[in-house]
Amino acid sequence: MSNRKSKNNLLHGESLLQIQRILRERFCHQIPHSNLFGVQVQYRHLLELLKRTAIHGESNSVLIVGPRGSGKTMLINHALKELMEIEEVSENVLQVYLNGLLQINDKIALKEITRQLHLENVVGDKVFGSFAENFSFLLEALKKGDRTSSCPVIFILDEFDLFAHHKNQTLLYNLFDIAQSAQTPIAVIGLTCRLDILELLEKRVKSRFSHRQIHLMNSFGFPQYVKIFKEQLSLPPEFPDKLFAEKWNQTVQGLSEDKSVREVLLKHFNVSKNLRSLHMLLMLALNRVTASHPLMTAADLMEAAQLCSMDSKANVVHGLSVLEICLIIAMKHLNDIYEEEPFNFQMVYNEFQKFVQRKAHSVYNFEKPVVLKAFEHLQQLELIKPVERTSVNSQREYQLMKLLLDNTQIMNALQKYPNCPTDVRQWATSSLSWL
Amino acid sequence: MPHLESLVLCREAQVSTLQTLFGERNHFSFPSIFIYGHTASGKTYVTQTLLRTLELPHVFVNCVECFTLRLLLEQILNKLSRLSSSEEGCSTEINCETFNDFVRLFKEVTQDENLKNQTVYIVLDKAEYLRDMEANLLPGFLRLQELTDRNVTVLFLSEIIWEKFRPNTGCFEPFVLYFPDYSIGNLQKILCHDHPPEYSADFYAAYINILLGVFYTVCRDLKELRHLAVLNFPKYCEPVVKGEASERDTRKLWKNIEPHLKKAMQTVYLREVSSSQWEKLQKDDTDPGQLKGLSAYTHVELPYYSKFILIAAYLASYNPARTDKRFFLKHHGKIKKTNFLKKHEKTSNHLLGPKPFPLDRLLAILYSIVDSRVAPTANIFSQFPLLISSHTTHSLSRFRAILAWSLLLRPSVSRRPLHAEEPVPPHVRTCVSTRVREAPRIHQAKATCRQSRVRRQGRRPLDAPAQLQGVVAAERAHLPASLAPLCRQETAKPSGFLLSVIRVWASL
């Protein structure tokens, strides 16, 4: 019996490794999956555009706009993959991938374009004056003859809004200029998360842009969200161990109908619709799947959801020493009395002394430098912040600060604070000295 | 794994979470992980130990050390290339100036056989300094897996919470892991772990208990507590070594060590004395009250006019300029009984700190409080540089302009009672006490030194000439009769006793 169990475990172990590999690739590495949820229309639009450039030689420009994690990169990658499967396209079309995070000015961008088009040998010793000349030379070099048979180039600009911050927006101007004029057919596809991208563009750049925008707005509802959840967790049919895959998929089906799991998903959906946060949740739940616990359960998902939604400031306050908690309570009282006006260390120390001088509390009678060290620790943790930048000439005790925690956070943190002395807790609830 | 548990105490949950996140060598892991927790909560130690024990290819970089973009990127690339080509010895240093080059070179380096199929880990310690570097650095590192299309995971270790890192337009959210602070039980366990072999574990545990009893309410930082434990242990063992008490005589040991620990809180904990000075003190076995910290050296005896200059400066910083006419003129004319203090001045000036003042106001006050005629000669002016903080190293020729801007002369006055070793001349004492005590509290009548004529006219009880006389007289002969009651009244209240303790920073 135990032999069979261990053999089962071994088989499971192997399959589990496979499952981990597949699911991790799906969640962490963002491999484009086959189903496009709710973006079919946009996908077809984009594909049509790309085909027109690649096959018919028509220049185009388009912006794909959507919040973070809504699938812009995934969409374009999918479209390009399908495009490259067409015969006549694959040997003709050139692709250039630019990213606003990497190419932080136009010089670097130009070098990168040169590199990706494999034109280093051509450009080698030529030195040109302006960006436009350089750029048009590059594109000329791609001509194989007359206009109709020159190579179409597809430019994909990720983090498009960062390109709009370059000096004079030279790259964007030239790209859109070539797209408008009758030169080499290019397609310029920008991906950005900012809805107000058009306001960032200069007038001359905006006028050359075709104002074509594709919006990805995560427009699915909760039932579709649950469907996505189920699909993301299910194993593909090509999985080698058919029996285990069947069991796994059945478990996933059961989970998607389970009430507590649906609650967790609903909470998650209400906070953020995008698929990245769903992937993080699933990844955390996947971590708990081991050889001894081969199938995912609802408890795993609930634990994962709890990990995702921790309040980090409360965690930080949990680890402070009692003296630092007293200082925070003193600041809270100052904020209550003076209605959120900035305070300095001297005021906080005064307030703290009022507490200490009550008869029973002399155990907290620390020296002023010790209290100042605790105050500076709070500043280091960025729980309090100076109102203006530190000037060398003003004394540290008199510099005005403000507290970055509000009253409910402080009271909640105090509830959870381990071994909180009762007098400190009572002081927190009311600052009246006759108590 | 048992070996790991013995190396890393009290962190089992975090170690297991990290292990499951890392997964198998060739599996993908989360592109970025953000670990936060208090200082000395073991983030760096656990991460390093785990990566080394599991022998995963990793690069450890401290952002305080690599404070520019170039330093950071080059260090990562060089360490990676050393990982990948371990047999060839020292390869050439890689040059990398921009993040774009970094991505390109990273792709090249990780193509190497050693690193090809495994997850490479880049650990950035003290990640809060990344926020102050170029703006594209943090979002770039968060997405490094996507940008380089390789199996790489970036770990960020920081004390500050993730919400303060997030860029304005959003970024790829990392997985956030919290390292909780150690509870008191955990702290005891860890501190008892490094007990010296000559003594028993119980003996050391009792010592740690006492130490935590004194310091736990103030400080929970493991590094500080360990430092204090190591420094003070010889003193604790002293009675046992000398044979005065056995290891179990807890009461005697406690009586011996407790004042010592209290003194340590005021000196070593604040870094007022260095650890070597502290150890020397323990060996010499002198009374801990004799120890002079750094701040003790800031009390110096000043020349005659400098004292008055300081008092004048103090008065100028804490009295509003409108009141000067009233206090310092012999005949200040008719002044209406208005609400003396403006609304915003009701908060005691001592809480808000000293205010700047122009130089001529200081000199005017100086001339009025010193009885004899003070000639504005170089003798007076040459004493100013002594009192100015060394933060400003301006030449003497620009002296006046600076003082007019005057953020400099801010003597900080503490309200400590008089110490035996710091005699302050009584005339200084009375002058300061009468002047500043009266200024904000105008409407309170004083029992002594008031004139009925003044009272009837509803003026301030202490008229200026009387005050000046009092001050001057006190200087010539200690405490004349007219002022004695006043001074007695002042000294009767120890908390209100004003004293000018002058802090002079290092001379110019």
Image: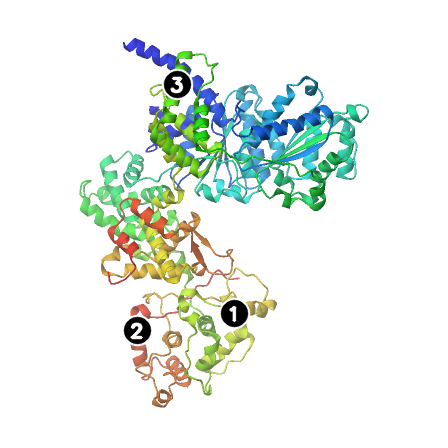
> Who is closer to the viewer here, B338 or A241?
A241
Query: In this figure, which residue is indicated by the disc labeled 3?
Result: A248
Secondary structure at badge 3 equals: helix
Q: Quadrant of the C terminus of chain A?
A: bottom left
Question: Looking at numbered disc 1 in the image, what kind of residue is underneath it?
Answer: Phe
Q: Quadrant of the N terminus of chain A?
A: top left
Secondary structure at badge 2 equals: helix
Q: Residues within 10 Å of mark 2 (few under 14, many from 20)?
A: some
**Residue B93's quadrant in the figure?**
top right
Question: Looking at numbered disc 3 in the image, what kind of residue is underneath it?
Answer: Trp
Horizontal side of residue B63 vs B254, given as left or right = right
**Residue B12's quadrant in the figure?**
top left
Q: Residue at x 59, y 69 (%)?
A: B401
Secondary structure at badge 1 equals: helix
Q: Are marks 2 and 3 on the same chain?
A: no
> Who is closer to the viewer here, B204 or B16?
B16
Q: Is residue B292 visible?
A: no
Q: Is residue B253 visible?
A: yes
